[in-house]
Image (spheres, rainbow, N blue to C red):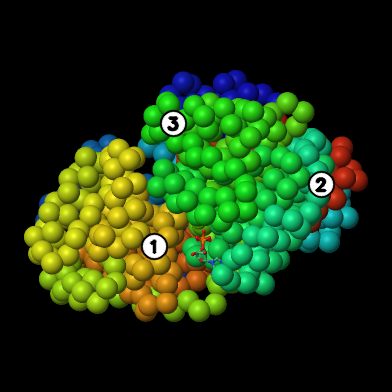
Amino acid sequence: MKSLEEFKGATKPVLGRLKKLGITNTFDLALHLPLRYVDETRITSIRDLRLGDHAQVEGVVIHAEAQYRPRKALVLQLEDASGLLHLRFLNFYPSQQAQFQPGVRLRVFGETRQGFFGMEMVHPQCRKVGEDEPLQQSLTPVYPTTAGMGQGSLRKLIHQAVLEVEPEDTLPSTLLERLHLPPFAEALQLLHHPTPEVPMSALEDREHPAWRRLAFDELLAQQLSMRKHYARRHEQEAPSLSTQNQLTAQLLASLPFQLTEAQKRVVAEISADLAQPHPMQRLLQGDVGSGKTVVAALAALQSIENGWQAALMAPTEILAEQHYQKLAAWLEPMGVQVVWLSGSQTKAARAPAMKACAEGTAQLAVGTHALFQEKVEFANLALAIVDEQHRFGVHQRLALRQKGGQPHQLMMSATPIPRTLSMSYYADLDVSVIDELPPGRTPIVTKLVADNRRDEVVMAVRNACMEGRQAYWVCPLIEESEALELQTAIDTHAMLSEALPELKVGLVHGRMKSAEKQAVMEAFSCNEIQLLVATTVIEVGVDVPNASLMIIEHAERFGLSQLHQLRGRVGRGAAKSVCILMYQKPLSQTARERLKIIYENSDGFEIARADLHLRGPGEFLGVRQSGVPMLKIADLERDADLLEAARAYADRLLAKCPEIAERHLQRWLGHAEEYVKV
Ligand code: ADP
Ligand code: MG
């Protein structure tokens, strides 16, 4: 295959523009598919034109006139055998005026609209033609492009690229017949040059079999790549941790509650994985408050009761600290050694904890990710649990390795991931879902309140706190400036302290020293502080059951999943909880839609689905940072059936016909980045 640089017209600036379009190799270019098409295969009689048609007509200029009122415009009258059409060019060039003299024959393509003199076209594409100029044989593709790259040159480049692609199919015809998909080369040819009888709407809606064929191929390549990595990791060795029902049974007996059915199911899935002599690679999803921590504790105990160490990592100090306290309270009475590792600890405090990990006396270590990844060594680590793993990019793998094998990995995500997404971008993991909340939770009432009613909101906070309840006040997210965000939090804290002298108002933000943060969180936990003003540092994990009122300022600036997470900080106790979303008027259309979704839904999976729909997978996953290549052709919603098929087929292919799998991967990924970085 020729490389891009060898193409005619592929100058340095052109290559730069292609790169902007996400095209870095010949295959990318051949797979750069049209956004829409224009039909230049036929000529419509002027008499048959309807308003709003996109059509091609041909005629002779009978009059050309530059007008200066109401705006400067060049107006042509074009006549064919059936009638007369006006063409209007605003800001025309003198060269155009010279070109379009009466008597010239033009073929024009444009959209008809109602003009002052009847039907007209504004800025149609025009071409001077001779009397019997042949028509285009196929629909003309219009490609997504970027500044400085005209359709004409893009078409020529793509044409060269398509010629370079091996026409041979990578997939067996039996499969293609079953899925009603055409051969690859035919699909590619058809999409770039569809014949006039192909319905344009099916092409533009991307539901034509040719589109579906390429979408399927792309999905299959993604599945093959990820499943291959899954299989490769699965071949490695890990300690087999059989169920002992000692410490785990003891913890279950000591809890003040019964596990929900969903928790029991995921505990069984995890427990079975741990008993395998291969590393577990499991993602545990559950809505906020669904009780993932106790599941993690049970997994850790299964490791510990087999004589191995476990580690639990969280993304923030606040969250890690909470986990530590909860787990220590549960496990230490059972004689389990739990150590706390934090970046903000003094060296003197950390040293014995590190030593205990290295010597094997610590059975469970809890701390922040960063710390683990850099410094800690373990004597015999068998299980690494990662909380809120979505914050670290989908495929970021832990630096936690040890001689003789990888530890089992349990990744927990509090942002529910819609099924299509977990089937595609998370295909290299097994997934467990807790799809049920513990009983006895009172649903959270959500209210939308405009900013100008702030005084009423302050009164509502006062009333709730005077009744012995507690509240969070979340300050606006200011993405452009962390400094400004911090200042807003400080100002809000001052404002609320003044307005509510009868309450103790606390402040917590990301720039505080971690000991200060801890002190504030502890004071809030034991109700010494009634109102906690916070930046989004409290987004994940914080669990203070007595807090039942949540105020979020400028809710329209937050992501949906983030709002759902924040809202999930209340509704954890028996008291009726309220979440007030304050917004600033006027709201844009999208902002209104987003707030409506949060207002109407309490189910995290529903919200995640809507969020995915509004933002697309890239934004949803935050993969911009993690660098996972995105699907370019397939759409998870539209092509959900193809995704199912690709998923089912990928494992079969890898097991039974690895050479076909290889060939397919080679075509799709041979020249590109891999879908998974290990
Ligand atoms: P998350 O899934 O958001 O991490 P947590 O593990 O923090 O949720 O659990 C939320 C709260 O629910 C905690 O206070 C926890 O002790 C409690 N909890 C967990 N499982 C149950 C259950 N089966 N019944 C009652 N309460 C539970
Ligand atoms: Mg949690």
Between circles 1 and 3, the one closer to the viewer is: 3
Determine crowd level at label 3: few under 14, some 14-19, many 20+ residues with C-alpha closer than 10 A. few
Q: Is residue 539 visible?
A: yes
Kindly state the secondary structure of the residue where label 2 is placed.
Answer: loop
What kind of residue is marked 1? Val
Report how far apart the C-alphas of labels 1 and 3 lie in the structure.
27 Å
Relative depth, front residue between 670 and 373:
373
Report how far apart the C-alphas of labels 3 and 2 lie in the structure.
36 Å
The disc placed on residue 544 is 1
Residue 676 x %, y %? 64, 38
Q: Residue at x 67, y 72 (%)?
A: 261
The residue that label 2 is drawn on is 276
Report how far apart the C-alphas of labels 2 and 1 lie in the structure.
37 Å
Q: Residue at x 66, y 55 (%)?
A: 298
What kind of residue is marked 3? Ala
Between circles 2 and 1, the one closer to the viewer is: 1
The vertical placement of 62 against 603, above or below, is above
Q: Are marks 3 and 2 in contact (CB under 8 Å)?
A: no
Toward which corner of the image does residue 641 lie, by quadrant? Answer: bottom right
Q: Quadrant of the N terminus?
A: top right
The residue that label 3 is drawn on is 349
Relative depth, front residue between 102 and 658:
658
Is 439 on the left or on the right of 107, as rendered?
Answer: right
Of the residues under marks 3 and 2, which one precedes in the sequence? 2
The vertical placement of 5 against 305, above or below, is above
Of the residues under marks 1 and 3, which one precedes in the sequence? 3
Relative depth, front residue between 373 and 561:
373
Of the residues under marks 2 and 1, which one precedes in the sequence? 2
